[in-house]
Amino acid sequence: MTTFFVLAFLLMAFSCHGSLACPEFCKCSSGGSEVVCSEVPLATFPSDDLPNSTTILTIQLTNITSITEEHLKVTPLLQELHLYGNQLQSLSPHLLRALPHLLNLDLTENKLRHLPANVFSHAPLRGLVLTWLDLSGNLLTRIPTALLQRLPNLENLDLSNNHLEEIPVHSLDGLAKLERLNLQDNKLHSLDASSFQSMPSLTVLFLARNKLSHLPGNLFHGLSLITHLSLYGNQLSRIPVGLFDPLASLEERSLDLTGNPLVCEGKTEYLCRWYEKNKRVFLSDSLSTCRCPNKKGQSLSAEMEE
């Protein structure tokens, strides 16, 4: 009986100690499962005092410039890692090796210029529970072809607001469960016809504010679940025949072609014909530069103003 009480006391003491451990300047939940370090004077990763029970870790708007595998070994149960608005300039190839349960990784608004091709390829991650990856607002000029190929459970990928000029062929292969892809605010000038062909679950695709001047006619082949598509602010003058035909699930006012110098002058123009059958999906002003006559003899721009 005495042994039982001793063990119970030690367990209680360990639990209490664990609940009190918290890095300086940070806030921790009572059980240590969530830690938040926001807008505090941190220059190094606060690994020494992190509870090993942490499942959600947020370190944002600090002066931290680097993070390593050793830093994250103390949080083996981590499911969400939010590193928004720090000063991270690079990632270790082995950064995530000790995080087999990671679901959500947010690296928004850092200073990342390059990513190791194998940073998401370590054995523990191949059970591949990672579903959310946000790399927006960095300085990336390219993504290695192999970077994302071993993330079969990924559902959301945000690469917006970088400096990407191309998406390498096959670099998005294997993302069969991806539902949302954001590539807007980059410098993409062209897309390969196969860029999105391995994404049958895709529902939202943002390609706004790039430098796209033409699109392959079969770019959206197999993407019948897409509900929202933005091509706003590119340099498209023509829409190839058949481009939008696979998009059977577009919702009302969900197709945005605004801000493109579209040229469509006759009834036989593909875009004119497709518009007549699918008016409800177009965002207002999407075809303001077109002159496709409707049944009243008006141009599309005049009709959309009514």
Image (cartoon, rainbow, N blue to C red):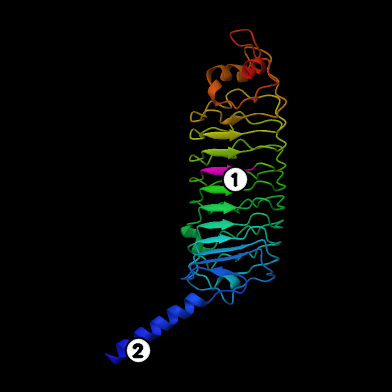
- Provide residue 21's location: percent of width, then percent of height: 53, 77
Please give left or right for residue 20 compared with residue 141 in the image.
left
Q: What mark, if any, has residue 6 been given in the picture?
A: 2
Pick the residue in front: 208 or 4. 4
> Is residue 182 inside the magenta stretch?
yes
Q: The N terminus is located in which quarter?
A: bottom left
- Element assignment for label 2: helix
Q: Amino acid at mark 2?
A: Val
Give the quadrant of residue 204.
top right
Q: Which residues are magenta?
A: 179-183
Q: Earlier in the sequence, mark 2 or mark 1?
A: 2
> Is residue 148 inside the magenta stretch?
no
Pick the residue in front: 282 or 267. 282
- Provide residue 297's location: percent of width, then percent of height: 63, 7
Q: Please identify the residue farthest to the bottom as the structure is shown.
A: 2
- Provide residue 279's location: percent of width, then percent of height: 55, 21
Vertical placement of residue 100 versus 278, above or below: below
